[in-house]
Every structure is written in structure tokens, then in C-alpha cells.
Image (cartoon, rainbow, N blue to C red):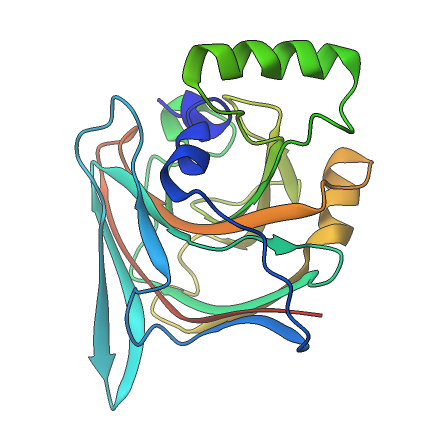
């Protein structure tokens, strides 16, 4: 179950001990996936079977390969970034197949061959009284604040009428459909987004300034399998 999308994802904060970085260049990240030294595994409580992430090479080009089989886990960048300084993200991805029973509107179908997470850090100094109470309780229970919210850029398994869908487990997580179905399976697809603009559309407010990025392939709800690839990811002004 994907209840970890909000409260389970606090494990990210505990596991990575991120420190926000200040950079003077126009680019925060240019990841070509020559290796995984910048990334850490992201595991979820009560999910024992993990997706496999590896570096593959073809025609002298390297890329990330994600293979899930009734499994769920991710990889997460070790550093945070300021989304107002670096609001744009570009990546190139490819899937071998969609998950046949996958459906972004059902808990039983909350699986994707590939998704790119943007995870926004909770800031108690700017939170409302109600949120401070809620997140304070979560910190007492788990030892860390859960994330404030997240955007999930997904390769959806089927066509949806909406581009932005609230996650079935947590309204704090919004699913943003980038590709649908398997018509483009086997093809490299370029994607580019402005996460500040998308956050405004999804939540109708400004995002928290500090965020992290993760990559995930999951098939634990459906029990199916999927293989997907990412060639590169860039985070820039």
C-alpha cells in the first residue's frame, strides 16, 4: 500500500540527512547516470521486495535501468535544492511496458513503470497552526517531519481525462501525467517541466522552497512487472 506517500516518505528525510546546496551556476544537477554515487536507495516500511536499479550501457551511452517485479523502492538524490532558484527539470525516459492493471485513480492500481518525484520539505516556521499540530505529532511518532507535499511525474498506464490527479492514498501527493499507455513504449521521450508552475496548478499556492528529487518504479500493488530507463536528468534555472 502506498500510504507511505506522505507519512512513510519521512524515511527519506531520516535516511539521507540532506543539506540544501547553494550554487552559482545556472544548473543544479546534470546527471548522466555514469554511476549512482549521487543517489541513495529509498525503501519503504512494510515493503520487503525492492525494485532493482542499475547502470546499463548501449552504444557507448550509459543510462539508469529500473526493473520492478511485484516490488517497490526508489533512489533519491543526496542533495536538496531551492525550487525558486532551479525550477526547471528536464529528463529523457523510456519504458518497455506499462502495468496492465495500473490505474492512478485506484489504490489497487497505484503502480507505474516509472515516476519522477519532487518532494517538498515541511517548514514549521511557515506552517499554519493546524499543520504544526499535525506534523508535530508525526515527528513525535516517527522522529522526523514528513514531507510537506510532493509532485509525481508519472508514465501513466492508461489514458486519464485530467493531467493532475490526487494520489489515492494522500491528497498531499499530486500525480502529473506526462505519458499515457504503451503507444510510445520502446521510444526515448524527452520531458521538460517547471515545477513551480505545476505546483501552483496542483495546489493553488506557492510551494515550499526546498525540495528533493527521487526516481521510482513500483509494481507491488498489482503484482506485475515493468522495465524502464532514464538517460539523464537536469535541474536548472
Picture quadrant of residue 86: bottom right
The quadrant holding residue 173 is top right
Closer to the camera in the image, 105 or 51: 51
Please provide percent x and percent y for residue 25: 66, 78
Q: Position of residue 52 (x, y in %)?
A: 20, 51
Give the quarter of the image for residue 236: bottom right
Q: In this view, does 236 lie to the left or right of 146?
A: right
Residue 100 in sight in this render: yes
Query: Where the C terminus falls, by quadrant?
Result: bottom right
Point out the residue furthest to the bottom here: 60
For the N terminus, the quadrant is top left
Q: Where is residue 113 in the image (x, y as percent from the top left)?
A: 35, 49
- Up-down: is 88 above or below 171? below
Q: Is residue 59 above or below residue 229?
A: below
Residue 222 location (% of width, % of height): 28, 31
Choose between 76 and 71: the one closer to the eye: 76
Q: Which residue is drawn at the image coordinates 42% and 45% (left, top)? A: 157
Residue shown at 29%/79% (left/top)? 62
57 relative position to 161: left or right: left
Report whether residue 115 is seen.
no
Q: Nearer the viewer, residue 227 or 131?
A: 131
Closer-to-camera residue (224/16)? 16
87 sits to left or right of 35: right
Amino acid at each position: 500500500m502506498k500510504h507511505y506517500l506522505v507519512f512513510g516518505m519521512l524515511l527519506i528525510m531520516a535516511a539521507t540527512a540532506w543539506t540544501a546546496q547553494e550554487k552559482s551556476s545556472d544548473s543544479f544537477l546534470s546527471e548522466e547516470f555514469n554511476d549512482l554515487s549521487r543517489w541513495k536507495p529509498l525503501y519503504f516500511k512494510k515493503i520487503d521486495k525492492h525494485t532493482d536499479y542499475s547502470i546499463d550501457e548501449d552504444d557507448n551511452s550509459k543510462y539508469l535501468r529500473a526493473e520492478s517485479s511485484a516490488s517497490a523502492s526508489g533512489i533519491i538524490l543526496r542533495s536538496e535544492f531551492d525550487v525558486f532558484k532551479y525550477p526547471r527539470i528536464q529528463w529523457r525516459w523510456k519504458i518497455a511496458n506499462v502495468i496492465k492493471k495500473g490505474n492512478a485513480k485506484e489504490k489497487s492500481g497505484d503502480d507505474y513503470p516509472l515516476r519522477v518525484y519532487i518532494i517538498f520539505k515541511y517548514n514549521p516556521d511557515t506552517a499554519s497552526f493546524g499543520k504544526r499540530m499535525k506534523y508535530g505529532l508525526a515527528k513525535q511518532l516517527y522522529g522526523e517531519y514528513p514531507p510537506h507535499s510532493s509532485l509525481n511525474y508519472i508514465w501513466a498506464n492508461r489514458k486519464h481525462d485530467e493531467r493532475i490527479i490526487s494520489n489515492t492514498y494522500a491528497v498531499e501527493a499530486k500525480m502529473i501525467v506526462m505519458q499515457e499507455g504503451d503507444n510510445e513504449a520502446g521510444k526515448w521521450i524527452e520531458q521538460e517541466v517547471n515545477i513551480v508552475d505545476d505546483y501552483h496548478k496542483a495546489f493553488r499556492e506557492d510551494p515550499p522552497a526546498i525540495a528533493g528529487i527521487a526516481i521510482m518504479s513500483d509494481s507491488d500493488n498489482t503484482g506485475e512487472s515493468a522495465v524502464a530507463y532514464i538517460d539523464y536528468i537536469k535541474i536548472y534555472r
